[in-house]
Amino acid sequence: MAIGDRARPRIVVVIGVSGSGKSTLGGALAVALGWDFLEGDDLHPAANIAKMAAGQPLTDDDRRPWLEAISQWMSGQIASGRSGIVTCSALKRSYRDILRHSMIDHPEGVLTFMYLSGSRDRLEHRLATRTDHFMPPGLLDSQLDTLETPTADEEIITIEIGPPPSEIAATALAAIGGVPLLVVDAANVVGSRPDGWWRDRAGAARRLLLQLAAARKRLPSEVVVVLEGGAKSAVTGEQDPEFGGLRLVLAAGSGDDAIVDVVANAGNRRSITVVTADRGLRARIEALGATAAGPRQFLDEIES
């Protein structure tokens, strides 16, 4: 599993009837969290798509191979230690149980269902204005008739679809614990190199930043790099456009104090990992509930 995401691998299934905004929310969550994303409808057999496009509702037999294909994707994600977001109507409890079955052999994984709930009028309006989907608006009644609204014992997160998409995404992120955070102690990471990088702190810091930028897609969505002393001259400032995917913090004094401030002000995150070998700093950030990771393992990962 990636060093910046030491929490257990997690699958979030965004469920609800057609027009509830599953794809919009699922895509937003995947971008915010840096997780893999699967549009569940992409796994429908051609026969299912043709049937729905013709205005014919699917039967349980039609849906089963589709649900099993999604379940296999989920199982593969957990087995590889990768978190992911998948959209799927999952209208009946029995359909959701097929997806739950994917976790039986993977106790290390976490499965969360997120149900998008909205009134018939709102759903109908959304479908009427949608032009890029094979599902005709006329099938909404069939979907609502099939829908078995999740009950409390299923422990499903329910989100109302009334607010704007950005607010819905913020609510969803908060519900699953927020965006993971990776904080890199640049001076300590550079100093741990066996090849003499530390002799040129600015040049070494710049090379590290370039590596981080190149590895950006394999790291959590928010990456903070704390620079102190001579390493600060590697960048033009905290808004250096060359490293726009990274958040830069230029420590006015102690880099350790700056890192502790970042962790203390991070809010309620799903996970916070600080890359450092400094034992004193590790104790301070662990006292705040963050996890420490060693520079060698981190460098191996971003250089792979």
Image (spheres, grey):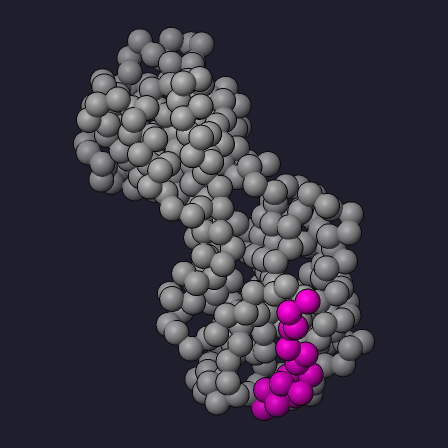
Q: Is residue 208 magenta?
A: no
Q: Position of residue 93 (x, y in %)?
A: 72, 72
Question: In the figure, residue 87 lies in which quadrant?
Answer: bottom right
Q: Position of residue 24 (x, y in %)?
A: 47, 67
Residue at 29% from the left image edge and 26% from the top image edge:
257
What number of labels is visible? 0
Extreme residue toward the front, this view = 287
Give the position of the N terminus as an image quadrant.
top right
Left or right: residue 99 versus residue 169 is right
Extreme residue toward the right, this view = 61
| Residue 189 visible in the picture | no
Residue at 64% from the left image edge and 50% from the top image edge:
110
Residue at 56% from the left image edge and 41% from the top image edge:
7
Q: Is residue 48 above or below residue 294?
A: below
Left or right: residue 298 versus residue 57 is left
| Residue 238 visible in the picture | yes
Q: Which residue is nearer to you in this view: 114 or 212?
A: 114
| Overall secondary structure of the magenta section | helix
Residue at 67% from the left image edge and 54% from the top image edge:
74
Q: Position of residue 71 (x, y in %)?
A: 72, 59
Left or right: residue 140 versus residue 200 is right
Q: Position of residue 72 (x, y in %)?
A: 73, 55
> Magenta span covers which residues?
138-153
Q: Is residue 80 above or below residue 63?
A: above
Q: Is residue 62 above or below residue 153?
A: below
Q: Which residue is nearer to you in this view: 182 or 244?
A: 182
